[in-house]
Image (cartoon, rainbow, N blue to C red):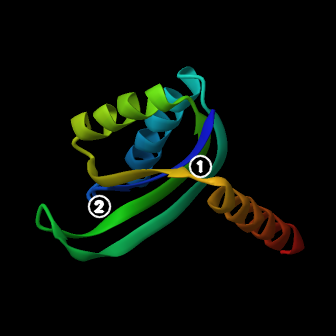
Amino acid sequence: MNQYETVFILTPVLSDDQMKEAVEKFKTLLTEGGAELLNEELWGLKKLAYPIEKKSTGFYVLLEFKADPTLISRLEVNYRRDERVLRYITVKNEKYAAEYAEKRRNKKANANKED
């Protein structure tokens, strides 16, 4: 199994519940496909660098997971079919990127414990 990161941008016209439901849909797709979710980050509503479909903001979501390479094509097909998704990118983490991502997760977890 390889380690991947996927970032997708959801349309800003969604309510919080609709946004969370869309994120859960993709998380469920991954777990049912045999993926192991490592991290989920909801970055919130951010300004886009350029308008997409006449929208200047979007909900950014990051998912880190370990999965079989065949699952990625199924995930991206679902991104394309879902009209709530404005843009997406999925990247395979090589060894050093995976180590960096783990350090970043641990640092974030330690910061949350101190709060």
Horizontally, residue 92 falls left or right of residue 59, namely right
- First-in-chain label (1 vs 2): 2
Horizontally, residue 1 falls left or right of residue 104, namely left
Crowding around mark 1 (Cα neighbors within 10 Å: few <14, some 14 to 19, many 20+) is many
Q: Marks 1/2: CA distance? A: 22 Å
Can you name the residue that lies furthest to the front here?
95
Nearer the observer, 2 or 23: 2
Q: Total number of numbered labels?
A: 2
Q: Is residue 52 above or below residue 98?
A: below
Looking at the image, which residue is at 55% across and 28% down? 68
Q: Quadrant of residue 97?
A: bottom right
Looking at the image, which residue is at 34% across and 38% down? 76
Query: Which residue is labeled 2 in the image?
Result: 12
Horizontally, residue 103 falls left or right of residue 43, namely right
Looking at the image, which residue is at 38% across and 45% down? 18
Secondary structure under tag 1 reads strand
In the picture, the disc for residue 64 is 1
Crowding around mark 2 (Cα neighbors within 10 Å: few <14, some 14 to 19, many 20+) is many
Can you name the residue that lies furthest to the left here?
54
The quadrant of the image that shows the C terminus is bottom right
Badge 2 amino acid = Pro
Q: Position of residue 1 (x, y in %)?
A: 63, 32
In the picture, the disc for residue 14 is none
Secondary structure under tag 2 reads loop
Q: Position of residue 50 (x, y in %)?
A: 20, 76
Badge 1 amino acid = Glu
